[in-house]
Image (cartoon, rainbow, N blue to C red):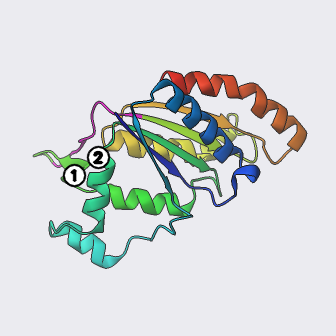
Amino acid sequence: MKLLCIISNPKPLEKSYGRRMTEVFLDEYRRNNPSHQVDVIDLYASNYPVLNYTEIESAREGSKGRMVEEAEKFKSYDKYLVMAPMWNLSVPSILKSYIDHIIVSGVTFRYTKYGIPKGLLSNKKAFYIGTRGGAYPFPASVFAFDLKYIKFVLKFIGVRNFKSFLLENIDKNPEKTEDSFSKKLEKLRLHARNF
């Protein structure tokens, strides 16, 4: 089994609840699955590029450019762990850029004879770790596109086994957030054990 962890937060570990939760999740996952391969992509540390015209045209022509390579690499994994903060109601642009590289017709999805897209990544699992500066209960939840976007994109390419874990209100009360964070860690470890 292979797990790919995608990190999209430029903050260092000690300043990021998302990174800390990801570390807790990965530690517990590795402890319970020592034979599994775990790879981590830190999009900011690797200065992940934005999609450009040459890459799009290369993928359209069926050439083995960066988009096709990234999509095939992504497809080779069995499980995905995605970590992102919510910025401006969505995910960081660098994560969107990564997603733009892996949504490739003929690799991660295809069109049926009726022109309907069909995901090609069946029997895969995904887990999303998200952080938000505020809380988004209904009706404010309609404006929080981070979780909706990740869930939709993964479903589009065929990943239907999807779970998420959010830590909200991190900018409102730091002491309360730290307490809430500590209390949620065991639940996060349980998710990791069952992933």
Q: Is residue 38 above or below residue 99?
A: above
Would you say 22 lies left or right of 36 here? right
Would you say 135 lies left or right of 55 here? right
Q: Is residue 100 above or below residue 173?
A: below
Residue 120 included in the magenta stretch of the image:
yes
For the point 56% across and 64% down, which residue is it? Answer: 45
Q: Is residue 84 above or below residue 178?
A: below
Could you say whether the residue bearing mark 1 is in a helix, strand or loop?
loop
The N terminus, quarter of image: top left
Q: Mostly what secondary structure, the magenta segment?
A: loop
Residue 50 placement (x, y as % from top left): 44, 71
Figure label count = 2
- Which residue is disc 1 drawn over? 107
Residue 24 makes an appearance in the image: yes
As rendered, which of 145 and 97 lies closer to the eye?
A: 97
The segment highlighted magenta reads 115-125
Callout 1: few (<14), some (14-19), or many (20+) C-alpha neighbours within 10 Å?
A: many
Would you say 109 lies left or right of 61 here? right
Which disc is residue 75 wearing? 2
Residue 63 placement (x, y as % from top left): 16, 69
For the point 64% across and 51% down, which residue is it? Answer: 86
Would you say 64 lies left or right of 56 here? left
Q: Are dots 1 and 2 in contact, CB under 8 Å?
A: yes
Residue 78 placement (x, y as % from top left): 34, 36
Amino acid identity at mark 2: Lys
For the point 39% across and 42% down, which residue is it? Answer: 154
